[in-house]
Image (cartoon, rainbow, N blue to C red):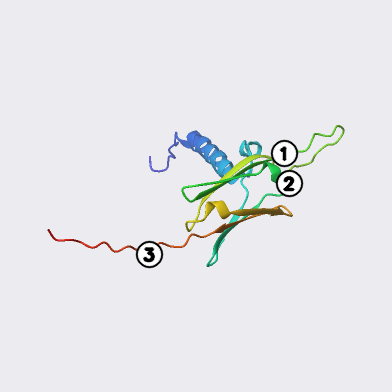
Amino acid sequence: MASEMMKWPYLPMMDTFKNEMNKLFDTFSGTGGEASFRGWIPPLDVSETKENVIVKAEIPGVDPQEINISIKDDILTIKGEKKGEKEEKGKNYHFIERRYGSFARSVSLPASVKYEQTKAEYKNGILVITLPKQEKEEAKKIQVTVS
């Protein structure tokens, strides 16, 4: 009995589980599967100076007129769409790595900002959003009265 190998009945299920996990990771990383056709997520850099919060988004190929920027509750949201090129007849692609489609990216700002003074500039595929910081309010002391 010790020399007999037992068959493990769960082996086919493990292979299915592995395939499902691979699909899940592909969806989050955007490296393949259905996620490749759903859109893309532009990379961001968020930095802070004494006066400003600066957000840089890498969004080449996006029409600046179609970029939508909003701020609510100190959360910055950038939305837009990178439109795909028209299919050319007679051209056989060997692979396509560039991403197209709608995107939305939200980031929590590290400081409260003056929304009305925010500036956005787009140059060479980089969107730079400069958000002036609000002055911090000093803690107000409240006098306790004794009755």
Q: Residues within 10 Å of mark 1 (few under 14, many from 20)?
A: few
Kindly identify which residue carries mark 2: 61
Q: Earlier in the sequence, mark 1 or mark 2?
A: 2
Residue 66 lies, in percent from the top left, at 68, 41
Residue 76 in sight from this viewpoint: yes
Q: Amino acid at mark 3?
A: Glu
**Residue in view at x 34 percent, y 63 percent:** 139
Image height check: is 120 above or below 139? above
**Circle 3: element type:** loop
**Residue in view at x 70 percent, y 46 percent:** 64
Q: Quadrant of residue 1?
A: top left
**Residue in view at x 74 percent, y 38 percent:** 84
Foreground pick, 14 / 143: 143
Tell me how far mark 1 sits from mark 2, CA to CA. Answer: 8 Å
Query: Which circle marks residue 138 in the picture?
Result: 3
Kindly identify which residue carries mark 1: 83
